[in-house]
Image (cartoon, rainbow, N blue to C red):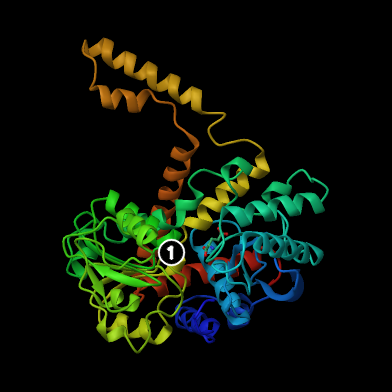
Amino acid sequence: MSTRPPRDGFFRDVNRHFVQAARHSTVDDDVLNQVRACNAVYRMRFPVRQDDGRIQVVEAYRAEHSHHRLPTKGGIRYDANVTQDEVMALAALMTYKCALVDVPFGGAKGGVRVDPRSASPGFLERVTRRYTHELLRKRFIGPDVDVPAPDVGTGEREMGWIADTFRNLDGDSLNGLACVTGKPVSMHGIPGRTEATGQGVAMALEQCLGAAEDAAAVGLTPGVAGKRVVVHGLGKVGANAARALAERGAVIVGVSVSDGGLYAPDGLDVDAALAHRRESGSILGLAGAHDLPSPAAALEQDCDILVPAALEHEISEENVGRIRAPVIAEGANGPIDAKADAILRDAGKLVVPDIYANAGGVIVSYFEWVKNLSHISFERMTRRYQQLSNQSLVGILERLSGESGPAEALARLTRPPDEIDFVRTALENTLAIAYEQIREARLARALPDLRTAAYVLAIERVAEAYAEAGIFP
Ligand code: GLU
């Protein structure tokens, strides 16, 4: 069973960030009250048969934080200790995240009190199908009302069960497949969704350290290449962030998982560390790395960039004074509590806030949802056309110059683009545009940090959407 204690106070912390930013916004108080309120929470208990024949009563939630845009959107967390407060906080973060990166959704989040590590696949399938059924009964799921996705403890497999259950119950409606994102590609998912959140963390860091003066403000040279990185938590987000950062030339000097942590000043290979864990049963004892005394010790190691990618509130008043990294990118949702956040700000650290740093997942979920609604893949209409145009351009250049280009560049130019190429470039572009806006707001409005700037933009956009809908004349 998960040993994580319940962490109440998460929604209060998100609201602290909200209040701190709202002071700098142009939005009226009564509208602010609506923007921050969690609109609806469905709390349910349902019986599910265990493998030994006994019945377990499972508690679950779905919070829809904001209906300023529909559908609402956000993952489903499977964790034995997930609480209503946590789900409400996570749903609020989804509202601000979607508004910030301009994907047209309200925010939501689900939670189911099961331990995915000890439960059997059969039990998890029965829980997932019954949860979907319960959501549908109250219209808390559907392509135009509320669209779940993976979160901690869930992945493609669960999303496949949800899509299948929904379509069976909903009479195979035309757009039924768009009821959930993060599905397997074989079930109309989109390539690149699984890695999207982690890759987005690396892309977000490239943006935040791109300008020489921004990097210099925290004593670093621009860019991610050559930076020493510690990743706390090697789940889907952390492992893919580490891979994407290593591809960009960063050196992963530390990692941690639930059973321990490693530090290697000369760098380590994340896949080798994970393979070693699978073979030996523990991440500890990897050749070339030192064992750390605890997973949390990874947070305190010497590095340029720290990526907390486990759960919320891992960095609190208790350990914040020992954080050495000048840059912290929130791969997880809410890994720094509000008090620790203020201390890091006063210490001059650069915190890349969750609603920007980990938005890659929901951005690619948006692409999947659009693809499902349009019933066509992104490359189908353009792939061959792009290949032909590139081939003719290469032909013209070769005729004019009388020479043929380097083989590798030619192969890249004349290869038809795949759906994953569109997904990656559109993800990167979306994050680049959002960062430009955050940076500009921070400078133009003299905001104290990136989180405040990100929240101000998000709050104003949600308020604007309410006004457009005629709710606040
Ligand atoms: N659970 C992810 C998040 O926290 C993704 C949500 C989605 O794709 O809808 O952002």
Residue sitting at x 34%, y 78%: 296
Q: How many marks?
A: 1
* Dot 1: element: helix
x and y, in percent, of residue 234 in the image = 39, 63
Residue 123 picture location, percent across and down: 67, 64
Vertical arrangement, residue 250 with respect to residue 48, above or below: above
The spot of residue 444 in percent (x, y) is 35, 68
Kindly tell me whether residue 62 is visible in this rendering: yes
Residue 325, quarter of picture: bottom left
How many other residues sit within 10 Å of disc 1, few (<14), some (14-19) or many (≥20)? many
Which residue bears the numbered disc 1? Answer: 356
**Residue toward you, 436 or 234:** 234
Q: Residue furthest front?
A: 52
Image quarter of residue 425: top left
Q: With respect to residue 466, does 169 lie above or below?
A: above
Q: Is residue 333 left or right of residue 259?
A: right
- Disc 1 marks which amino acid? Tyr
Residue 36 lies in quadrant: bottom right
Of residues 144 and 468, the one drawn nearer to the viewer in this rendering: 144
Q: Quadrant of the C terminus?
A: bottom right
Query: Is residue 448 among what the camera can see?
Result: no
Q: Residue furthest bottom?
A: 318
Quarter occupied by the N terminus: bottom right
Residue at 21 percent across and 10 percent down: it is 402
> Does label 1 point to a residue whose CB lies under 8 Å from ligand 1?
no
Residue plotted at (79% across, 50% down): 168
Displayed-image quarter of ligand 1: bottom right
Q: Is residue 454 left or right of residue 122?
A: left
Q: Position of residue 140 (x, y in %)?
A: 73, 65
